[in-house]
Image (cartoon, helix red, strand yellow):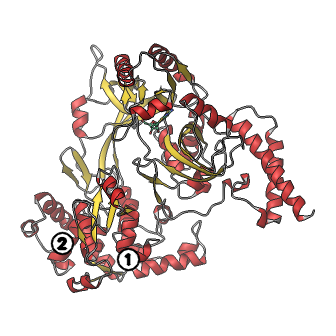
Amino acid sequence: MAHADIRAKLITLRDEIRRHDYLYYVKARPEISDSQYDRLFRELIELEQAHPELVTADSPSQRVGAPPLGELVKVFHKQPMLSLDSILDQSEVQAFDQRMKLELETQFVEYSAEPKFDGLSVELIYEDGIFTRGATRGDGNTGEDVTVNLRTIRSLPLHLQAQSHLPGHLVVRGEVYMRLDDFQALNRRITERGNDAFANPRNAASGSLRQLDSTITATRPLVVTCYEIMAASTPVPPTHWDELERLAQWGLPVPTRRRLCSSIDEVVAFHRETESMRDQLPYEIDGVVVKVNRRDWQSRLGMKSRSPRWAIAFKFPPRKETTIVQDIVVSVGRTGTLTPVALLKPVEVGGVTISKATLHNADEVARKDIRIGDTVKVERAGDVIPAIAERVPIQGEQRSTPFCMPDRCPICGSSVGREGAYFYCTGQLVCGAQLKGAIEHFVSKHALNIDGLGKKTVAQLVDEGLVRSLADLYRLTKADLVRLEGFADRSATLLLESIAASKTVSLERFLMGLGIRQVGQHIAKVLAREFESLEEIMSADRERFQQIREIGPEISESLAVYWSEPHNREIIAQLQQSGVQIAPGMARSDRRKSPLAGKIFVFTGGLDHYTRNGAQEAVETVGAHVSSSVSKRTSYLVVGRDPGSKLEQARTLGVRIITEQEFAALIRDGERSLS
Ligand code: IVH
């Protein structure tokens, strides 16, 4: 075939496949059988394999196969992704209607109502009709780039249908979620392989979409529904209703169940009808979203700090079912926290079978007075792990004795410590339940910073029995690593090199890596500044720690308890025997030479990887300063979760705005890390 013919053939094949994807995944009205579809798809793949130069980004073949990512990259949303205010009662929806009428100075407001999908919100960007980028909502200002993962969702068109009005630049918002039957099948698959099941479809959707390896996402049955045009380079239809129609014309999936309501009473009826069919729907919804239909009115009503005034989530009450507590067991989390868990006689709550519920902590068990054998109401509010709402007293019942927390860890037998209502295992580095978490923490960026040792590899190393303690990391050989799935000669060499490079580490990073309770980056730095050596810290007592300004009784206690456990000292000895040695920290005189010396940083919003003090310390190590307010002199504004008004000020003043990730890179690698 001539090259031009092959190109033409590829175009026809792709259009054909897209049409069938649309019919199958969006319209649910397939026209061909699965095997006919597979044949078309194979034909495309074979032709593209023979002519890789003709592969396009929007080809259906490109839905899978992107290489795994090291971490999800943060993206800043040009338009903030707002949230919705929620209401539960009919009276509140009436009040909402009154507010709208008052503000709009009218008696008649038309509403568009649609289900509130219980998934996670995404931003989808199309350039010239081609899907180019997608991100999670995150905190509304910064989300994560999940483009390659979104590409694997078959109901998401990679290529919009070229209708008139197709804008060159289009930003759409939608919800990614999982059908209930798919969710249950996925959980069965996962648990058969010995992994933990997802608590609910929403967690499953979120976990699947936020994968680093898109080939895993591709095996997860995600779906998407779109409900808003966030930005477009050409005019958007005048009403929300028409906006949805327009999205549908472009081939995007939109809520099939929706209603244009000419009064709030019709909205209430829609809510009632939708709630009554909730259990028959193949996916989870947790309410109805009510939106003022006219977009000019939406603009007039405007928004509050993080939600629009013109829309509201009219939620359904959480579902509760009655069952029996068969046992109360204690699970040990990755950080050593002991959580009482009720094992229940399996019960179905809104399409999901529940056989366990968290009891949170000992105080909660006592407050609700839950004992083995009790009849209880379990509740699944959509966004939370199932919880026991209340006990149902039964007349004349014989109750068992009240539950109490164990004084030894059920996994490793170490003694149990207590912080307020929380109990924890003190065996950090010897407890099987905590080993993976402890290693992940030890090798993490702000601790020993071992590159290439992500969560997945840590799990493999522990599961294969190659690593039973921190020191085992330093005994790994190439032969060990190449046996693991996903490792080749080169990746094994690289990992061994970064493990070897971590052998010389600052006192501060080493302390941080141990994961001592209450000792994060900041306190590790304080300790490293205060003491000459690790040995000195190990022989200090509570009183000595308390003499340090930033260290209070709780941290002193935690340090003292930590060093009193012989197994912790043993681990330090093992690490030292394996060649780990502590290098002196960055001397004060070095700071002036840093290229960031003199820069001024301002922070807004919550940070994921630093405490505020930690971030300040990091800035100070490079000779820069932190200021509490934005001015023209500010060098960088670091934006975390839920930023405040500083963000607007920085935008107005043209101050460079960076994410937490960029900040970390900046501190580590200097300004060349920012493009
Ligand atoms: S509209 C500015 N419509 O609910 C309005 N949101 O609690 C933006 N959600 O974060 C939202 N279904 O993830 C809208 N039909 C729907 C929705 C919906 C689910 C989610 C969305 C949002 C959350 C707010």
Q: Note whether 52 is above or below 590 in the view shown.
A: above
Specify the farthest residue to the front: 105
The residue shown at (19%, 79%) is 535
Question: Identity of the amino acid at label 1?
Answer: Gly
- The front one of 503 and 217 is 217
Of the image marks 1 and 2, the number of the one nearer the N terminus: 2
In this view, the mark in front (1 or 2): 1
- The front one of 201 and 621 is 621
SS at mark 1 in the image: loop
**Numbered tag placed on residue 490 in the rendering:** none
Residue 109 image point, x, y percent: 46, 20
Residue 297 image point, x, y percent: 45, 29
The residue shown at (55%, 21%) is 260
Can residue 430 be seen here? The reply is no
Taking 442 as reference, is 523 left or right?
left
Residue 618 image point, x, y percent: 28, 70
Taking 552 as reference, is 657 left or right?
right
Question: Identity of the amino acid at label 2?
Answer: Leu
- The front one of 141 and 88 is 141
Residue highlighted by disc 2:
527
The residue shown at (68%, 45%) is 160
SS at mark 2 in the image: helix
Residue 385, picture quadrant: top left
Count of numbered circles in the view: 2
Residue highlighted by disc 1:
670
Q: Note whether 545 is above or below 100 in the view shown.
A: below
